[in-house]
Amino acid sequence: MSDPKTFQKLRPAGRLEKFSTARHALGIYNNVSSSAVYSTSKPGPKSIETLMFRTLAAVIAQHPSLTAIPVDEDKESTYFVRLPKVDLKDAVIFLDREHDFDETGGACDEELDNVVERYHNHDQKDRYGEIPFWKLIILREPKNNSRFAAAFIFHHAVGDGMSGLAFHRTFLTALQGVEASDSQDENFCTVITPPDMPMIPTLETLHPLPLSLFFLFKAIIAEFVYGPPKDHWNAEPISLDPDKRRRRFRSISLSSDLTQKLVAASRAHSTSVTGALVACFADSLFANLEPEKSAALLVDGAVSLRRFLPSNVINEDSMGCWVSRFEHKHLRTSTTVDAKSGGSPFPWEEAKAVKDSIDAELAKNGRDAVTGLLRWAGNMNQFFLKKNGKTRGNSFELSNVGVFKAHPSTKVNGTDHEDSGWRIGRMLFSQSADLTGPPVHVTVVTGGDGCLSIGFSWLAMNFEDAWFEKVLKDFRARLDGI
């Protein structure tokens, strides 16, 4: 096996990237996943394998991060190198469904959920230096090559949640192009040479992330004087025990009609879908937690910083990690009861307050961002190791990557790509539960079919599955009642 230290060096890892490489090295956080159901109105290809390999080769040619791997993840000197070659047969895994998936009516894709959960329990360290830090799982349907699900599982330093959408946008365009070119050579060579392209610069290179003295002082006081708030629910203390790392995953999907109702109701109440989902899930947790142990819930969520970066360097199709986060505190109220009792109206006022928190974070244009504090975190590995046994900071995290939008139709050999018939329908966004993070990670995306999908990741050590099923049932009932 070749030594990655002899590979072409690309650039040092930034502080935000080291946040991910350190967690991965320690087994604290494994990966992110972005999945999509692809379908065509035409008969499927003779060989789905060849079609996937040719399409993926075209995608890799456009994204240098897909052939970059980190070296010395467990050190402060982490840097990226380029794999000298990639055998696509090592990067793509083909699985067969037991049953066809019915996308109508917002049905849950349990088979895809199981695949996602399985890979969220595996890191990206297999065959280090030989294969990329991601995998593409193709879930095929019985005797039907005209539809498949593609789960892109990737290291968080390779990309953020928006990068998952960028991957599928590029993959769909490439898939349409390969189909339109009508050149599916079954003898296609799966060993490819990565493009000689530089990695996109780090977040810290593209934005100064300035911190005011007041913001820095508040962060120091919160970390070293007060610690995590005593009044909010945060499940079990942090444990880095290898025997307590089992990750669980579930998802629910809303029909396109219910998704539209949620969007319309959110606008009518001067909030956003993200604000509505955060407030609704908080109420569902309150309704299933003992009041004396949950006077409050502290939520955080990802905020994309792409809009504040040079548009000639970063756009919606770029793959990399450029995020920060917002925080919002929910207080238990007398109206927080089980949704089935009919006594709890949808928390629109709280939903608006969440949107206000998000807007306030965005209004700072990258100033006083939590991500900017990473420069003061010191040795990143020690930063995480010191968390063992301590109280978790937040109650849950919710990240919404928005609505998937495909590229405008272009032409290949005079033919519209869209004539190939390939479309993206249902999508699913998820991430592996973080050993040092909040008890629950909630991830949201709206696919090309107009259906909003919500993923839930958690550690089995934090609570019983049966209890969380009650939370999800309550959450779904509240959404259905909009």
Image (spheres, rainbow, N blue to C red):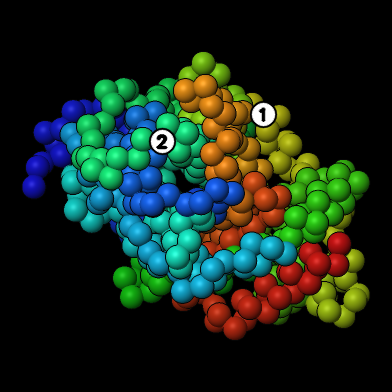
Residue 238 visible in rendering: no
Left or right placement of residue 266 versus residue 27 in this view: right
The residue indicated by pointer 2 is 182
Type of residue at label 1? Lys
The location of residue 408, given as percent across then percent down, is 61, 28
As rendered, which of 266 and 153 lies closer to the eye? 153
Query: Label 2's element?
Result: loop
Query: Label 1's element?
Result: loop
Residue 423 visible in rendering: yes
| The C terminus - image quarter | bottom right
Q: Given this view, does label 2 or label 1 mark the residue nearer the observer? A: 2
Residue occupying image coordinates x 57% and y 66%: 101
The residue indicated by pointer 1 is 364
The location of residue 91, given as percent across then percent down, is 29, 49
Q: Is residue 365 above or below residue 27?
A: above
As rendered, which of 473 and 332 lies closer to the eye? 473
The location of residue 12, given as percent across then percent down, is 29, 30
Q: Is residue 224 above or below residue 291?
A: above
**Of marks 2 and 1, which one's residue comes earlier in the chain?**
2
